[in-house]
Amino acid sequence: MLKKENAVLVFIDVQGKLSELVDGSEALFGNLRRLLQGMNALDVPVIVTEQIPEKLGPTRDEFQEVITGQPIAKSAFSCCCEPAFFQCLAKSERKQVILCGIETHICVYQTAMDLLEADYEVYVVADAVSSRDPANKALALRRLENEGVKLTGTEMLLFELLGDAKDPAFKSILQIVK
């Protein structure tokens, strides 16, 4: 089970025009926003990455207000190839890594594989990842699951992290998922 005290969210490359070209972008953006709000309500740290931001642009404006901290720029597809990412992850002292963002079959997939190899417990939020071609997302989710990554959904994840209706964050989470 996911525990908020041991979890960290990695928000991968939700930038510029590419983010608008992925399949189901409107639903994706809604789930990503709920995830970010939920992490804030539950005090779960968030690490944000940006793929070559000088070319693809910064993280979408609509997420800037709910993101704290500076995004980590990268050029490799896997976040794990960027030393600043691993430093930030190690500093969090958390071993359950939740992935969301784009594209599922490239950056999310390669990051998940590297995290598994580094002995992290990896979760992918299936309704908070996407690719330009839905077939690529479906293929990536199948491969991820076969490799040992745990799949979850936005609402399922938030309530799993919450754990108890008596938690002070319960009302906030309820408002976020409505």
Image (cartoon, rainbow, N blue to C red):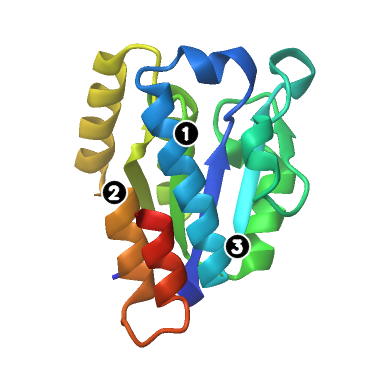
| Cα–Cα span, label 2 and label 3 | 18 Å
Label 1 residue SS: helix
Label 2 residue SS: loop
C-beta proximity under 8 Å, tags 2 and 3? no
Q: Which residue is mark 2?
A: 153
At which x and y percent is residue 56?
69, 16
Residue 93 marker: none
Q: Which residue is mark 1?
A: 29
| Residue type at numbered disc 3 | Pro
- Above or below, 34 against 76 in this view is below
Q: Is residue 25 visible?
A: yes
| Cα–Cα span, label 1 and label 2 | 14 Å
State which quarter of the image contains the C terminus: bottom left
| Residue type at numbered disc 1 | Phe
Q: Is residue 3 visible?
A: no
At which x and y percent is residue 172?
46, 69
Query: Farthest residue in the bottom direction?
Result: 166
Q: Which residue is mark 3?
A: 45
